[in-house]
């Protein structure tokens, strides 16, 4: 069976440039442009890809060692990473080059254009703090195992964290395959909307994030979680 053609759109977000991917079935990808698995290179940015998703520190402590707490937890002084405090969350989301995007639209199916527009509208509302649930249709590409993990993660309530083991149990994965769950999470093609940034270790430590741990910190704090 012939694979669906994937179309791409470059966008700007409060957390940096990114790439959307979609086919006629739905949104297939949302990647920050410096992620290792971003499908296209934005050469004009000379973007250096993230080589270590566990790298990063704050005040001399490695970010992956910080623990995440729910919104109601009393944690004392909460971490506020510079990336979070410097982000203009009200900047919203826009096509990186509106004229070029308009020209490219001529060869893109209407259904794909509608997924791009819906995704940008929902992400814009999310970054501005007005939306917590995404409804854009997804067209996840991966193995049966990966898609099962991603679909389970996509249903995670917006105020909850989940560990790799809990995600595996919820997805119906055998305990011996929990390591593979971590690999699947690391290959999640749809950042934020499939909320892999809310997957943490069993002791609630940050572990890693394909978009960089600084972004993971910023996203969690944006959603009201606390870190220390």
Image (cartoon, rainbow, N blue to C red):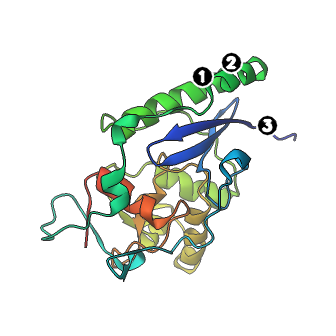
37 to 78, vertically: above or below:
above
Q: Which type of secondary structure does the marked residue at label 3 adopt?
A: loop
Q: Is residue 144 visible?
A: yes
Q: Is residue 132 visible?
A: no
Residue 148: image location, x then y, percent: 58, 56
Tell me the crowding category of disc 3: few under 14, some 14 to 19, or many 20 or more residues within 10 angstroms, Cα based.
few
**Distance from the alpha carbon under mark 2 to that under mark 3:** 15 Å
Residue 2 is left or right of residue 72, and the answer is right
Q: Which type of secondary structure does the marked residue at label 1 adopt?
A: helix
Determine which residue is flagged by label 2: 110
153 to 76, vertically: above or below:
above
Of callouts 2 and 3, the N-terminal one: 3
Dots 2, 1 in contact, CB < 8 A: yes
Residue 125: image location, x then y, percent: 38, 33
As drawn, the label of residue 218 is: none
As drawn, the label of residue 4 is: 3
Q: Residue furthest right?
A: 1
Query: Which residue corresponds to the image point at 38% horizontal and 40% vertical from the top-left?
Result: 127
Quadrant showing the C terminus: bottom left
**Distance from the alpha carbon under mark 3 to that under mark 1:** 17 Å
Determine which residue is flagged by label 1: 114
Q: Which type of secondary structure does the marked residue at label 2 adopt?
A: helix
Answer with the quarter of the image where residue 66 lies.
Answer: bottom left
Residue 6 is left or right of residue 150, and the answer is right
Tell me the crowding category of disc 2: few under 14, some 14 to 19, or many 20 or more residues within 10 angstroms, Cα based.
few
Dots 3, 1 in contact, CB < 8 A: no
Dots 2, 3 in contact, CB < 8 A: no
**Distance from the alpha carbon under mark 2 to that under mark 1:** 6 Å
Residue 163 is left or right of residue 30, and the answer is left
Query: 2 and 58: which one is in front?
Result: 58
Tell me the crowding category of disc 1: few under 14, some 14 to 19, or many 20 or more residues within 10 angstroms, Cα based.
some
């Amino acid at each position: 069976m012939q694979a669906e053609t994937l179309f791409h759109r470059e966008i700007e977000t409060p957390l940096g440039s990114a790439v959307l991917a979609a086919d006629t079935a739905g949104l297939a990808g949302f990647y920050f442009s410096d992620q290792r698995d971003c499908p296209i290179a934005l050469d004009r940015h000379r973007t250096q890809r993230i080589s270590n998703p566990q790298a990063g520190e704050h005040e001399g402590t490695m970010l992956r060692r910080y623990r995440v707490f729910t919104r109601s937890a009393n944690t004392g002084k909460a971490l506020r990473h510079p990336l979070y405090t410097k982000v203009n969350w009200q900047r919203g989301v826009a096509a990186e080059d509106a004229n070029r995007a308009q020209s490219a639209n001529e060869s893109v199916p209407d259904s794909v254009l509608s997924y791009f527009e819906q995704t940008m509208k929902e992400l814009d509302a999310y970054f501005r703090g007005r939306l917590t649930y995404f409804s854009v249709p997804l067209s996840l590409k991966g193995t049966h195992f990966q898609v099962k993990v991603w679909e389970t993660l996509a249903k995670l309530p917006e105020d909850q964290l989940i560990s790799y083991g809990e995600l595996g149990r919820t997805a119906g994965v055998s305990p011996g395959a929990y390591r593979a769950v971590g690999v699947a999470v690391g290959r999640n093609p749809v950042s934020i909307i499939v909320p892999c940034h809310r997957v943490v270790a069993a002791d609630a430590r940050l572990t890693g994030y394909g978009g960089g741990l600084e972004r993971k910190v910023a996203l969690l704090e944006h959603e009201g979680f606390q870190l220390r």
